[in-house]
Amino acid sequence: MGGRSTEILYGSNVTIGEHVIIEPGVVIGDDVTIGNLVVIKQGTNIGNGVHIGDLCVLGKRPASNPKMSQKPPVDLPPLMIGDRVKIGCSVVIYCGVNLSEDVFVGDMASIRERVSIGNSSIIGRNVIVEPKTEIGSRVTVQTSSYITSDMVIEDHVFIGPCCSSSNDKYMGLGNYPHQGPIIRRHARIGNNATLLPGITIGEQAVVGAGTVVTKDVPPGETVAGNPGKPIKSTK
């Protein structure tokens, strides 16, 4: 087992549904509820007061093929789930993820490896979070948004439904360092906005619904349109 514990450690008052698979080395805290048909992979650490919905896979290991430009590392740390986290149904969360206290993950969301999510953040229904992304505290990412890899989202950011982001300026040609958008504190992103690679959205900036952001947005500025252009300042 590579030196890992083969014992499953249970806290008190743990409720487990039907047909649940818990692999060796899992640690489960107190007052945890696990739904039906859940798979918890080796080494996953679950804090106190966590609620896990039906049909989830937690601690999944990533796979790759020769075409992938960014291959996942072989040795990843276990999935860490903080106290009072709530995970919806049909959620897949990979190993190498750290969910801090009070995070909410909606139904059918997917969170890839090497992602950290800060306290009290919300990952909405059907949201995809790709690898090597940092999400701060009290962030809201609403339904069906795509959070690309190599992205930084600071504290108190709001991202509306169906936002799309990208990290590869030349779309697979291999001659551009992958860098997703950087979204600074208290910025707000409207529905269906598109954020192109490497741009920075400044603190307290606003991106209007449907905007295509092709260059940096200064702090406090509001942009809208395709491409996004300033329409007013909130300063």
Image (cartoon, rainbow, N blue to C red):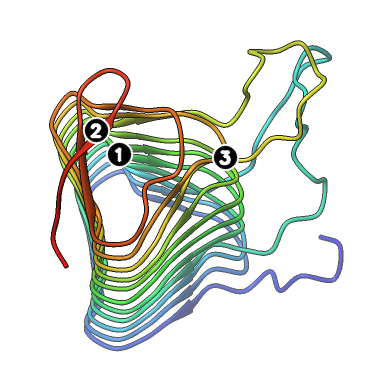
- The kind of residue on which mark 3 rests is Gly
| Circle nearer the N terminus (2, 3) | 2
Residue shown at the point (38%, 77%) measured from the top left: 82
Residue designated by label 3: 198
Residue shown at the point (46%, 35%) measured from the top left: 215
Residue designated by label 2: 126
- The kind of residue on which mark 1 rests is Ala
Residue shown at the point (36%, 86%) measured from the top left: 11
Q: Residues within 10 Å of mark 3 (few under 14, many from 20)?
A: many
Please give left or right for residue 184 compared with residue 6 in the image.
left
| Circle nearer the N terminus (3, 1) | 1
- The kind of residue on which mark 2 rests is Asn
Question: Is residue 16 shown above or below 182?
Answer: below
Residue 41 screen position, x and y as percent: 55, 52
Under circle 2, the secondary element is loop
Identify the disc placed on residue 109.
1
Q: Which callout, 3 or 1, points to the residue nearer the camera?
A: 3
Q: Residues within 10 Å of mark 2 (few under 14, many from 20)?
A: many
Residue 16 screen position, x and y as percent: 25, 62
Q: How many discs appear? A: 3
Please give left or right for residue 74 compared with residue 150 in the image.
right
Of 79 and 182, which appears nearest the observer? Answer: 182
Under circle 1, the secondary element is loop
